[in-house]
Each structure stands twice: as structure tokens, then as C-alpha cells.
Image: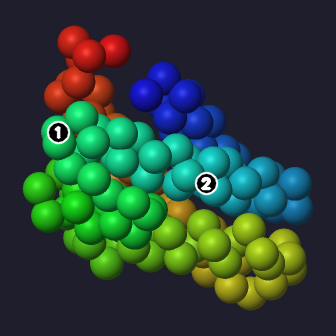
Amino acid sequence: MANLDKAVVNLEKALTLPIDQELVFEGTIHRFEIVAELMWKTLKRALEFEGLSPKTPRDSLKEAFRVGWLHEEATWLDMLDHRNTTSHASPADELVAKNYADIAVLTPKIRSTLDFLKARYARAE
């Protein structure tokens, strides 16, 4: 979970920077892609620790929602969609700009879930 924690801190820092420079915009989106990847993998490992067997990123999020670890299922599933669209779009793409705004909304939810997981598995680390 340490890698996810570090990645979330980096994303939170990036969101405090003005996006008037293209590199800040691109860097923030790239940090989000890393966080999204680490988040679903962390959830998958935690669910497996609990005896469940999600196979895909979407399965991991749906299962975490089912057991009550996540709220607003559609928001989390959108996270996967954003990760997929930002990794295949150019920085000038209008969709990327919309995703950037959504990243700012989703990041506190990611932080909250990470804090929950850290508290739940504090002894396992």
C-alpha cells in the first residue's frame, strides 16, 4: 500500500498546481493513471486477503462496492473509464480536459478509500 499512498500524495500535490502549463496538466493526468492502476490492484489484493477472487479491474471495484468498501459505484467505474481514455488521448483532446475536472472530484474519494484500507490492514503491512 506504500506505493499507492505515495502515488496519491503525488496526485494531490499535482492538483494544487495551476494548470496554465501544458506539462502540469499532462503530469497530473499521468499521476492519476498511476493511482487508478494501483488502486484497483490494491483493492484486488485486499479482497483476495478476505477470500474473494476478483479477476479484472472492474470486478475488483464492483466487489469492493458490494462489500461496502466503496460508495458511489458509478463514480469508481468512471475512474476506470477515465484511466483508459486519458491514456489513449492527446493532451489537446477535449475529453482529457473533462477527465481532469473529474480527477479533482475523485481524488478525495481515493484518499478516503486508501485511509480506510490502511486502517483495516495496519497490522498486515
Towards the viewer: 103 or 118: 118
In the image, residue 101 above or below residue 39: below
Q: Which kind of residue does numbered mark 2 sit on?
A: Phe
The residue pinned by badge 1 equals 50
Where residue 31 appears, as percent x and y from the top left, is: 67, 48
Towards the viewer: 80 or 102: 80
Question: Earlier along the polypeptide chain: callout 1 or callout 2?
Answer: 2
In space, the residues marked 1 and 2 are separated at their CA atoms by 27 Å
Towards the viewer: 59 or 117: 59
Position of the N terminus, as image quadrant, is: top left
The residue pinned by badge 2 equals 32
Can residue 87 be spotted in the picture? Answer: yes
Instruction: Count residues near mark 2 (Cα–Cα under 10 Å), then give few for <14, some for 14-19, many for 20+.
Output: many
- Left/right placement of residue 15 relative to residue 69 reads right
The residue shown at (46%, 46%) is 41
Where residue 99 appears, as percent x and y from the top left, is: 60, 74
In the image, residue 15 above or below residue 123: below
Question: Quick one: SS at disc 1?
Answer: loop
Where residue 101 appears, as percent x and y from the top left, is: 56, 71
The residue shown at (48%, 23%) is 2
In the image, residue 86 above or below residue 42: below
Q: Which kind of residue does numbered mark 1 sit on?
A: Glu
Q: Quarter-wise, where is residue 109 in the image?
A: bottom left
